[in-house]
Image (tube, helix red, strand yellow):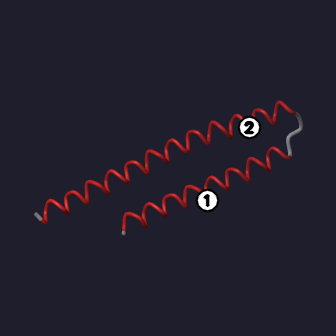
């Protein structure tokens, strides 16, 4: 159960940060002075999102692997 709590906490924290980024980008886009500036902001947003989602996926995979290893260790110690 501790793993699920940690996993959920990590996901919620990540999503909260992504929402902040989304709002910040929307605000910036609303204040663009021309289409080139808007395209630049959108490209930065997408690149940043890809990097953040990739990093977060790595964290979650590592958390899952650690939980599996821990469960295996517990199982092995019982036998």
**Residue that mark 1 sits on:** 16
Within 10 Å of disc 1 (Cα), the crowding (few <14, some 14-19, many 20+) is few
Closer-to-camera residue (5/27): 5
Residue 47: x and y in percent read 63, 36
- Look at the image and tell me in which quarter the N terminus lies: bottom left
Label 2: which secondary element: helix
Q: Is residue 69 left or right of 58 when viewed as pictured?
A: left
Mark 2, Cα crowd under 10 Å, few <14 / some 14-19 / many 20+, is some
x and y, in percent, of residue 62 in the image? 37, 49
Q: Dividing the picture into quarters, in which one does residue 53 lie? A: top right
Q: Which residue is drawn at 20% across and 63% down?
A: 74
The residue lying at 48 percent from left, 59 percent from top is 10
Could you say where residue 69 lies in the image, as x and y percent from the top left? 26, 54
Compute the Cα span from label 1 to label 2: 20 Å
Whether 34 is drawn above or below 16: the answer is above
Q: Which numbered disc covers residue 28?
A: none
Which residue is depicted at the point 49% across and 44% down? Answer: 55
Dot placed on the residue nearer the N-terminal end, 1 or 2: 1
Q: In which quarter of the image is residue 51?
A: top right
Q: Which of 69 and 27 is in front in this view?
A: 69
Report the residue marked by disc 2: 42
Q: How many labels does the image show?
A: 2
Point out the image quarter for the C terminus: bottom left
Q: In this view, does 14 lie to the left or right of 5?
A: right
- The residue depicted at 89 percent of the width and 38 percent of the height is 33
Occupied quadrant, residue 63: bottom left
Q: Residue reaching furthest right?
A: 33
Q: Position of residue 11 (x, y in %)?
A: 51, 58
In the image, residue 8 sits, relative to residue 64, either above or below, namely below
Determine the secondary structure under disc 1. helix
Q: In this view, does 15 lie to the left or right of 72?
A: right
């Amino acid at each position: 159960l501790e793993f699920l709590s940690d996993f959920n906490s990590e996901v919620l924290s990540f999503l909260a940060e992504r929402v902040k980024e989304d709002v910040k980008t929307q605000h910036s886009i609303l204040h663009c002075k021309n289409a080139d500036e808007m395209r630049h902001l959108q490209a930065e947003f997408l690149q940043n999102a890809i990097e953040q989602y990739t990093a977060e996926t790595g964290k979650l995979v590592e958390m899952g692997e650690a939980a599996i290893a821990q469960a295996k260790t517990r199982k092995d110690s019982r036998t």
